[in-house]
Amino acid sequence: MNRDLANQSIAVIGYGITGRACVRFLLSQQATVCVFDRDVNIQETVKSDTNVKAAVFEPDMSLSSFSIVVVSPGVSPHLPCFATYREQGGVLIGDIELFAWFNKTPLIGITGSNGKTTVTDMLGKVLNSAGLHVELAGNYGKCAVDLLLEQAHTATPAMDIVVLELSSYQLEMTESLQLEFATILNITEDHLDRHGSFEAYKAAKQRIFNMAKNIVVCRDEVFSYPLAMELNEVGITNMSTRICAEVGLLNSLTGYSVGEILVSDSLSNSSIDSRSSHLAQSIAEPCIQFNGSALVALSDLHLKGSHNYINIMIVLAICDQLSLDRQLTIKAICDYKGLPHRFETIRVSTLEVAGKASTITWINDSKSTNVGACQAALACFTKSDDYLVLIAGGDAKGVDLSPLKKIIDSQVNQLIVLGKDAHKFIELIPNAIHVRNLQEAVATSLSLIQKADRANAVVLLSPACASLDMFVNYQDRGNMFASAVNEQVA
């Protein structure tokens, strides 16, 4: 494949944020670019750029006149026009593959059904705190190809590392990345409307391992390991020797795990490593450990929940592999407070009922766009006696919701549902309350808590679904929830 793009005729499919970034980069390489988009006004949209042609995209159109076709992540590469183009010998790629052709900066790749944005963001902040110039890109942060343009300007400082969050959409169209480290945090059913089956979705995620020098795995997640190891395929030895670190929740004397350590009950806000020489009256305290030696107490972390302890261990493992100062790494992790819309407490309010006060914690977990994310959020209340209201629903993306039934039955006092696939939740939990919007969901939550007459309550927005049926994106959904809470709660 000729990667000198000058004067090559290249099509870009989709003119959203990623498509526009690809066009900018391709023009910088003196390529001849034509944009295709479903927007019937696409020619009007791009007319300000006289160097770009544009036309409306059709799923059965001919692309044979283009030497390369770059498909945006939001466009399925399984459409008939792309199958025909490939059969004709055309080069069909995504934005990350285009980036990989020209990138010269060390890369770390993060994927998974849930937690990948948290890990990407946390890792970036920890690496920056160590004095490294780090950029976040891919499915979170900047468009990867924009980094190529930035680096072309001599005034821009050279990057030490790029941390890429990689979605299944991006991975299925990528084969040339050279990742120093890669991890799959977990794989649960998601995007079956795009991939067609869970097997195809897993295969897309697993592609990250084919492009990684070193692999960090989670012992608790079977799909966090390369599937080639399960199948005894050729290359098993090579794949297994690339596993550089393992993490897991169960206490283990090897790798990273969660255990207990005796610590002084009078000391806090420092890593256990720095406290261990000051033991006085000692108590057993849960901690993250490495090879059986305590690193940091869970009580010192802002992020809570088993899923977040896995995320933290992944970040620790990568930083240790990079030989960073462990104490500085632990401090930066302890300082990390998480992302907006990811299990974010947006307000704590008080509701007076017959002279009694109920304290209500309102949690925005709008980034919960699949079943696994909702399960992780609900698992945080396993030992809680709070009255729990769950607000869920949206576009389930063709996924089976039944794995939620057990945890909803055991943890949730009342389920409120909305959106396109609300009926699927009602089939699962017949006493669920169907509402039209988030304003009504908040009002219903207040009414339920008033009748429950409990000292403490939690209202959790954790939809387990995509947001596009009712909102611009999950951020818009989370902001609408916060606005509804602030409008209705005294």
Image: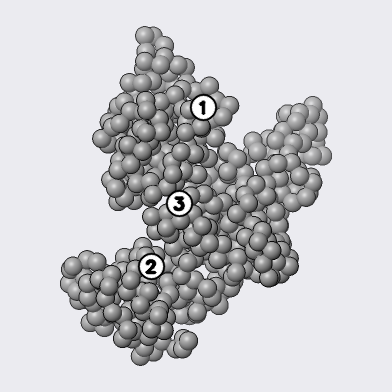
Examine the rendered structure and indicate whether residue 101 appears above or below residue 73.
below
Q: What residue is drawn where x is 62% and y is 47%?
A: 310
Residue positioned 49% across, 23% down in the render: 386
User: Pointer 1: what residue?
Assistant: 410
Decide: marks 1, 3 in contact (CB < 8 A)? no
**3D distance between C-alphas at marks 2 and 3:** 17 Å
Residues at marks 1 and 3, CA–CA distance in whole angstroms: 24 Å
Whether residue 147 is visible here, answered yes or no, is: no
Three-letter code for the amino acid on which mark 2 is drawn: His
Quarter in which the C terminus is drawn? top left
Residue position for label 3: 190
Q: Secondary structure at mark 1?
A: helix
Give the class, few, some or many, for how many residues have Cα within 10 Å of label 3's Cα (few <14, many ≥20). Answer: many
User: Residue 226, position in %: x, y?
Assistant: 63, 61
Check disc 2 and report its element: helix, strand or loop. loop
Nearer to me, 108 or 133: 108
| Identity of the residue drawn at 56% across and 47% down | 336
Q: Quadrant of residue 163?
A: bottom right
Q: Position of residue 202 (x, y in %)?
A: 53, 58
Nearer the observer: mark 2 or 3; the answer is 2
Relative to 304, 18 lies left or right: left
Q: Which residue is mark 2?
A: 78
Q: Amino acid at mark 1?
A: Ser
Total of numbered circles in the picture?
A: 3
Mark nearer the N terminus (2 vs 3): 2
Q: Earlier in the sequence, mark 1 or mark 2?
A: 2
Q: Is 143 placed above or below 431 here?
A: below
- Amino acid under disc 3: Asp
Q: Are marks 1 and 2 in contact (CB under 8 Å)?
A: no
Residue ID at (37%, 25%): 431
Q: Secondary structure at mark 3?
A: loop
Residue 471 visible in this rendered orientation of the protein: yes
